[in-house]
Amino acid sequence: MRIVCIGGGPAGLYFALLMKKLDPAHEITVVERNRPYDTFGWGVVFSDATMEGMRAWDRETADAIEVAFNHWDDIELHFKGHVIRSGGHGFVGIGRKKLLNILQARCEALGVELLFETEVDSDEDFPDADLIIASDGVNSKVRNKYAEVFQPDIVTRPNRFIWLGTTQLYDAFNFHFEKTEHGWFQSHVYKFDDQTTTYIVETPEDVWKAHGLDEADTGQSIAFCEKLFAKYLGGHPLLSNARHLRGSAWLNFQRVRCRNWHHFNGKSHVVLMGDAVHTAHFAIGSGTKLALEDAIGLTRLFKEAKAAGGGGAGDIPAVLQRYQAEREVDVLRLQNAAWNAMEWFEVVGTRYCDQLEPEQFMYSMLTRSQRISHENLRLRDANWLEGYERWFARRAAAQAGVPAPLTAAEPANVAPAIKPPSPMFTPYRLRGMTVPNRVVVSPMAVYSADQGMPNDFHLVHFGSRALGGAGLLYTEMTCTRPDARITPGCAGLWNDAQRDAWKRIVDFVHTNSAAKMGLQLGHAGAKGSTQLGWQKMDEPLESGNWPLVSASAVPYLPVSQVPREMSRADMDRVTADFVAAARRGAQAGFDILELHCAHGYLLSSFLSPLTNRRADAYGGPVENRARYPLEVFAALRAVWPEDRPISVRLSCHDWFPGGNTADDAVAIARMFKAAGADIIDCSSGQVVADQKPVYGRMYQTPFADRIRNEVGIPTVAVGAIFEADHVNMVIAAGRADLCAVARPHLADPAWTLHEAAKIGHAEIGWPLPYLSGRSQYEANLRRAAAMAAGAQA
Ligand SMILES: Cc1cc2nc3c(=O)[nH]c(=O)nc-3n(C[C@H](O)[C@H](O)[C@H](O)COP(=O)(O)OP(=O)(O)OC[C@H]3O[C@@H](n4cnc5c(N)ncnc54)[C@H](O)[C@@H]3O)c2cc1C
Ligand SMILES: Cc1cc2nc3c(=O)[nH]c(=O)nc-3n(C[C@H](O)[C@H](O)[C@H](O)COP(=O)(O)O)c2cc1C
C-alpha cells in the first residue's frame, strides 16, 4: 500500500510507524510543514493507561517515551491561600517536541519517509496514494475542503487561554486560582522535563477583555500573567514559544467532531485522524491520547484484515468503515467527559470560586469530568478522601445542629478510630426539619387511591420505604380537588377524611423510623382527567372525563381535552384549594411541603412559554409567567407552619425549542427564593409531549448544581441517580443538598439500607426485627466481593 500522512503530529507519525512495522512493504510518507525541531506548545500529558496501550503496540517507542517522561501522581490545588494535595492520579508528562522527536526517529528507523518543511495544499497532490491520512490538526485543510462530506461540527468555547511555559518546577500537577477586580483566572501547571513546566492560563472572555488583554501582544500578556501568578513562579519567567503567531496568543478552544471520517476522492481513500476529526479540551489532557489511540485503532483493523488473508488496498473501504464505527464510541465518551471538565473551568469563576470552601472546591475540581466518582477517589487516595469525608461530616453536623459524629478535639495528626460517614449519610436541616440522611423518596404517583383517599396500599408503600432507610419520603402529587387530579387513582387532600388517612401514614413513618415525611401538592391542569399510569398514560379517560383548566387553552396531546384558559376567579379558587390542602397537610403532621410547579401540570403550564400564551399580566416575560405560581406559593407560606420548610419542584428545561432552559430556571428559582422557598427540587421536561430530553446518568443534576451555586439556595438533584456512589458524588461536590431517587425505590423499598451495606456504611439503623436479615445480607455481599476479587486474581 502507498500511504501518505498529511501532518506529522502525534497522529500522523504514530500511524506511519505502526503501519510500517505491521508490513515493511508499505510505502509510507509523512509530510509536515514544520522543521523537525520546530513546535509550538510545551508539554502534553496523558495517563498511565495510554502508556500501557502504546507499550503493547510498539515497545521501542514506549521505552523511549518512558525514559523521557515525567511521571507524577499528585494534584495540588492553590486556592484562597490554601494548598490541598491528593494523590493516586497517575499522569505522564512529556515535552511535545520530545514526543515528536521520538516518533520521528522511530519512523526513520523503520523506513518511513519524512518530508519536512513541505506545505500540503491538497490531498490530490498524492494521486498515487492508496490511503491518505489527514492528520493535519485542528484547522485541517483536508477536512475543510470536504466539509460537505465530513460534516464537521465545530463549537468555539468562550474561555480564553494562553499556552505558556516556565522554568519554575513543581512536584505535582498544580492548579492555581487568582481573583482580580474583574474575575477569576486559573492556571493548569505540569512539569514535562527536568527544566520546564507547562503553564496554561485561562479565563472567561469578559474577564480577559476587562483587563484589556484583547489589545495586548504576547509580551504584555506574559507580563500580566507573571504579575498575577507571581507568588507561584518564585521569580521565574513565563515563556512563550508561539511568538511567531500573528495576533493574540490567547486562543479559544474549538470542539471538533465530524459526522463522517472518511472519503474517496476518486483516486485515494482519505481518512481523518487526531485533532482533524475530534478535539478534547486540555482540562482532561487527552487530545494526544485520542490521536495515538486513533493510530492504534486503524492499525489494528489492518492487522486483523491481514490475519484474515488480506490487509491490502482492497480492504481499505471496509477497514475505514469499521475504524469510524469503533473509534467514534470511545471518542464520544471521552469528549463528553472532556466537555464536563471544560465547562467546569468555564463557570468556575461565577459558580464555585466564591461559593465553595477550599476543601469542597478541591472535591468539585477532582470530579469535574463526572468520570471520577467518590469510590474512585477512594481508590486513588483513601487518606485524602477520608479526611474530606470527616470535614464534610463536621460541616453537616454543624449545619444540622446535631453533635458531630467524631470528636472535633482530636489532634490533627491523629486519625480518629471511627470511619467518617459518607456524605450521603450526613444529616441536613431545613428550618425546623432535620433529615437523617440525604436520600429522598421522590414523589411518585401510585394511582391506587379511590376518590382521592389514601388507603392501606399507601400505608404499606410509605411504611416500607420509611423502614428502608430513606431520610425523607414524599407523597405522590397530592391533588387539591377532585378536578385537580391527573387520574381517578390519584391521591387528594380536599377533605378531613383524607387528612386523617394521611395522618395515619405520617404517624407510622414518624413512630417507626427516623424518616421525615413530605407532602407534594399539585393541580393537574391540562394533564388532568387521564388514564392510570399503566393504561394509556396521559390520554383522556374512556368515560367520565371532567373539564380542565390551564394557563392557556393548549392541549397536551392531539387527543387530549382542550383546557379552558384560567380566569382570575379560577385562580382565586385554585389558590384557596391549595391553602385548604396545605392547612390539612400541616394538621396531618407532614414535615415539609413541596409545591409541584413541574412536568406541565397547572403551575408549570404558567411557567413555560410553550403552554402559557396569555396576553395578560400572567403571560409574556418570565416575571409574568411566574406571577401566579408565586401567588400560590405566598398563600401557602402564609398558612404553612413557620418552622416547616417549603420546596418547589421545577422543570428546569423544557427540552423543546422556544421553551424554558436552565437560564429561565435560574431566574424562576431566584424569584421563589426571594418569596421564601427553602429548597428547589430540580426536575425537567414533560411540559410538552414532543420534548427531546438528553438522558444519561444523573442527567438533571447540572440544573441542581447551577441553581444551588448561582442562586444560592439549597437544591434537590433527581433523575437517574441509582447508586450510593452517585449520591455521594453529588452531595460531596456541593452540586445539590439532597438526592431524590424514584424508580430504584419502586424496585427496592430498602434501597438506602442496601446501598449503605454495599459501601460498608455500618452506622445506619435497620429496624430491629430485621437485624438477622441484615447480617446475612452483609455476609453475602462480603462473600460476593471476595469471589469477585478471587476471579480477578
Ligand atoms: C493548550 C493546549 C494544551 C494541550 N495539552 C494537552 C495535554 O496535556 N495532553 C494531550 O494529550 N493533549 C493536549 N493538547 C492537545 C494536543 O496537542 C493535540 O490533541 C494533539 O497534538 C493532536 O495530535 P494531531 O497529530 O492530531 O495534531 P497536531 O499535533 O496538531 O499535528 C498536526 C500537524 O500537522 C501539520 N500540518 C497541518 N497542516 C498542514 C499542511 N497543510 N501541510 C503540512 N503539515 C501540516 C502541523 O504543522 C502539525 O505538526 C493540548 C492542546 C492545547 C491547545
Ligand atoms: C411511576 C412514577 C410516578 C411519578 N409521579 C410523580 C409525581 O407524582 N410527582 C412528581 O413530581 N414526579 C413524579 N415522578 C417523577 C419522579 O419523581 C422522578 O423525578 C423521576 O422518576 C426521575 O427519577 P428516577 O430517575 O430516580 O426515576 C414519577 C415517576 C415515576 C416513575
Image (cartoon, rainbow, N blue to C red):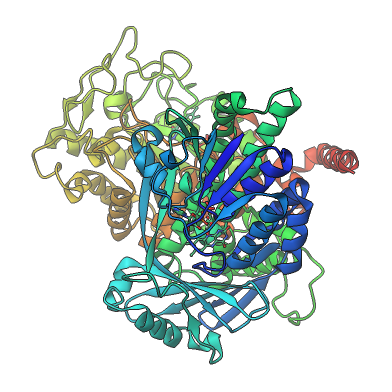
Relative to 612, is 96 on the left or the right?
right
Residue extending farthest to the bottom is 235
Q: Residue at x 43, y 17 (%)?
A: 532
Q: Position of residue 247 (x, y in %)?
A: 31, 70
Residue 59 seen by the camera: yes
Q: Quadrant of the C terminus?
A: top right
Relative to 414, is 424 on the left or the right?
left
Q: As displayed, is residue 701 above or below residue 477? A: below
Residue extending farthest to the left is 615
Q: Residue at x 39, y 15 (%)?
A: 531
Q: As displayed, is residue 441 above or below residue 495? A: below
Out of 79 and 394, give the one closest to the viewer.
79
Q: Residue at x 43, y 29 (%)?
A: 497
Q: Residue at x 30, y 29 (%)?
A: 688
Residue extending farthest to the front is 128
Residue 438 seen by the camera: no
Q: Position of residue 790 (x, y in %)?
A: 91, 41
Query: What is the tally of numbered marks visible in this picture?
Result: 0
Q: Which picture quadrant has residue 789?
A: top right
Q: Position of residue 702 (x, y in %)?
A: 45, 50
Relative to 14, is 237 on the left or the right?
left
Q: Position of residue 135 (x, y in %)?
A: 51, 48
Residue extending farthest to the top is 543
Out of 703 and 140, give the one closest to the viewer.
140
Q: As displayed, is residue 153 above or below residue 400? A: above
Out of 48 and 650, give the one closest to the viewer.
48
Q: Quadrant of the N terminus?
A: top right
Out of 694 and 793, give the one closest to the viewer.
793
